[in-house]
Image (spheres, grey):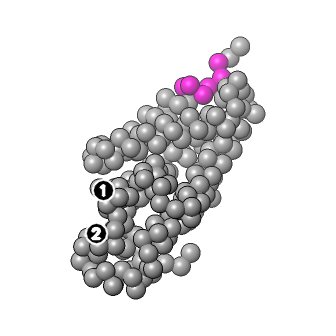
Amino acid sequence: MEITPRQLEIIEATGKILTASGANGLTIKNLAKEMQFSEGAIYRHFSSKEEIIIMMLKYLKTNISKILSNLTKTGDVEKDFVIFFTRLSLYFKENPYFVVTVFSEGLMDESDKINNEISGLMTLTSSHLEQILQEGQKQGTFIQSVASSDLTMISLATFKLHMFNWKFNKFKFNLTENIGKMSASLLALLRRNPD
């Protein structure tokens, strides 16, 4: 995906505004003010607010896709489960203003095109995690009484809540440590008890 340095700067400023003020606070006027640009300078790089949000979501999806495609399966599903969440949390720790897309706060009301991008991002992460959970069920490591799709939703919803708390606390607590504890707690629930 081709993106210019100036477009990336605009995308990052968009993330800051979305994080601080939600989708209603994101206007070209507010974006220009945040960047100390004229509104015309923003329009030289993007034709609309919608285009900026779509580019931000595509950029995020590209980065998340690279992270997930570089994860090596260790053969230990519990370790793979922890690595999945650790790598995502490290990315968001380094890029906190993209965290708003994790819970799509207000973005889904913007347009069908934005909804499609959010849906693609959700599908990407959930399908990767579900593969780990399915393998764990196949090996007999994880419980089999709950469908892997439901376990995926529960795990990602828990991750989403931790990310929301991190944002709510102004990114002040140690995210990776918190997500590590979350992963351990989820694994305790996922493990199949020996008969």
Give the residue displayed 31% in from the left and 44% down from the top.
168
List x then y, in percent, for residue 187. 55, 30
The answer to whether one can see residue 68 in this image is no
Element type at mark 2: helix
- Callout 2 amino acid: Asn
The vertical placement of 34 against 149, above or below, is below
On the question of residue 75 being in view, the answer is: yes
Label 2 close to label 1 by CB (< 8 Å): yes
Q: Position of residue 75 (x, y in %)?
A: 68, 42
Judging depth in this view, the residue of 119 and 90 nearest the camera is 119
Above or below for 153 versus 16:
above
Give whichever of 32, 159 is nearer the camera: 32
The CA span between labels 2 and 1 is 10 Å
Q: Which residue is mark 1?
A: 21
Task: Assign a secondary structure to mark 1.
Answer: helix
Label 2, on which residue? 30
